[in-house]
Amino acid sequence: MTLTFPETYVDILPEVSAFLEQEHRLYIGGRWAPARSGQTFETLDPSTGKPLARISSAQSEDVDLAVSAARRTFDSGAWHHNLTPSDRSRLIWRLAELIDAHAPVLAQLDSLDNGKPVGKALKSDVPLSAEHFRYYAGWPTKIEGATIPVSTPGMLNYTVREPVGVCGLIVPWNYPLLMAAWKIAPALAAGNCIILKPAEQTPLSALYLARLFEEAGFPPGVFNVLTGFGETAGAALVEHPAVDKIGFTGSVGVAKTIVRSSAASLKRVSLELGGKSPNIVFADADLEQAVVGATWAIFGNNGQSCTAGSRLYIQRGVFDQVLEGVADETAKIRVGMGMSAHQPDLGPVVSQEQLETVMGYIHDGRGSGAETVIGGQRMGGALADGYFIEPTIFVRVQDRMKIAEEEIFGPVVCAMPFDDPAEVLQRANETPFGLAAGLWTRDLSTAHRFAARLQVGTVWINTWGDTDAASPFGGYKQSGHGREMGKDGIDLYSEVKSVWIRLG
Ligand code: NAP
Ligand code: MG
């Protein structure tokens, strides 16, 4: 069974304690201000269910102030005109250095707020965030237009790429700092001014990041943070006529609301949404590698990843062997509190609400005839106050069961046998989602055929979960609009202007 242990904790850093105890305000135009209405909310530690800090809850009047501040800075040209591209590069690079310098603090904040093991945040989330800023720090000096060979005699035509303007960036709780970095870095590099709305469950690292923007010396108004709720702060940002673009990562349901309410101003919208990613193990694969890959494809970050490999298709001849391997790997997973000194692999899910959602799916799966080979329970004992769920594997799953169709966003995988490649390809694509897919095979032609025919934004072959600031990421179908990362990220946060000059 999944391992737990008597808990001992990593010491909370003095900087983190001091930060948690201070009054948390909104960051608008380079100043810290409470919400005009005085409204606040609590952010909790999902490992214990206990409150961590009281946070300002931005309402529409605060959104107005933040949009005015960002608009003023953008229109004054303080960021994209008055600074040279090389000045902007240096500032973004400086921010990356400050993230590195404050990595232990940021890791503890994300661990306390989200529940993820502090060691994982320190080894992965925080350095990847710094790396994202470093990658985009290189871009301001490389954003080029083109000279176009138009066929009108005596005419010069060229293009320039310009920032979109004021960008509202709305992010989820699963990788609080990293999801913010994915959006902020390209938006900054392209010359935009930003209003960040972190998730209500995980506002702390966004507020700390604002301090680092101050310390780095960004012009006031380039970066603003509005903590609060989606239905109030988020919705007001989307509806605001002076916001030029919304960059959103989150659920399909909220994305549809955003698309509808952005219609009044026809602002630009880019969307990174969920998935029900198929992970396909062929009988000819390196099965040892596939077993480990399939286990972490779903259980990495507790299944709270948009790319979680939640539909595991295994070729029938090796089904029992691979399933047994994945179950054995899963039994070795160590679950503990985010700040546990025992370096657990997984923490709790993020909230009571998420706990209930995931347990609801497990209940539904059993009710519709699927069976768990491991897991399926909320965890008790020392972990009873937090939102801990055993990593869970379902078998006897039919494609049309809810657990096989809907995104669970928790530590639950459906293992399903398949017979031949054509059949599994069709089943893999039979979903409204299209974020990612994986396959495990030694056959080069299977690899290339599936890479070409899977209707997804990312295909992983004999690997899972790799991303890089330089490589585009995003979804087909209802997994989103647009591609983040790499040059595509710059395109996503810029407009193209075509200039015509009569040469006489
Ligand atoms: P969510 O409810 O969609 O929330 C995401 C963000 O949107 C939060 O900041 C939320 O604020 C805000 N929001 C909620 N309602 C809003 C509204 N009406 N207008 C504007 N903003 C609004 O998603 P979640 O449950 O927090 O996160 C999990 C989901 O995100 C999963 O479905 C997952 O697949 C997806 N996800 C996708 C990616 C990707 O890269 N494709 C990455 C991570 C997660 P509140 O916090 O106040 O609700
Ligand atoms: Mg939410």
Image (cartoon, rainbow, N blue to C red):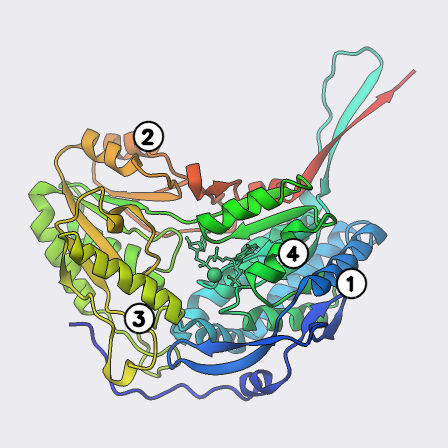
- Find the residue positioned furthest to the right: 504
Mark 3: few, some, or many residues within 10 Å (few <14, many ≥20)? many
Q: Where does residue 252 sit, x and y in percent of width and height?
A: 45, 48
Residue at 33%, 66% (x, y): give it: 356
Mark 4 lies on a secondary structure that is: helix
- Badge 2 is on which residue? 453
Tell me if mark 1 has few (under 14), some (14-19) or many (20+) residues whose alpha carbon lies within 10 angstroms of its own: some
Tell me if I can see residue 222 in this picture: no
State which mark lies toward you, 1 or 4: 4
Q: Is residue 25 left or right of residue 353?
A: right
Circle nearer the N terminus (2, 3): 3
Q: Residue at coordinates 23% horizontally, 84% vertically from top-left?
A: 381
Of 101 and 111, which appears nearest the observer?
111
* Cα distance in 3D space between marks 2 and 1: 47 Å
In this rendering, is residue 100 above or below 15?
above
Per the rendering, the mark at residue 219 is 1
Circle 3 is placed at which residue position?
A: 345
Q: CA distance from mark 1 to mark 4?
A: 25 Å
- The CA distance from mark 4 to mark 2 is 40 Å
Of the residues tagged 3 and 4, which is closer to the observer?
Answer: 4
**Quadrant placement of the C terminus:** top right
Q: Is residue 451 visible?
A: yes
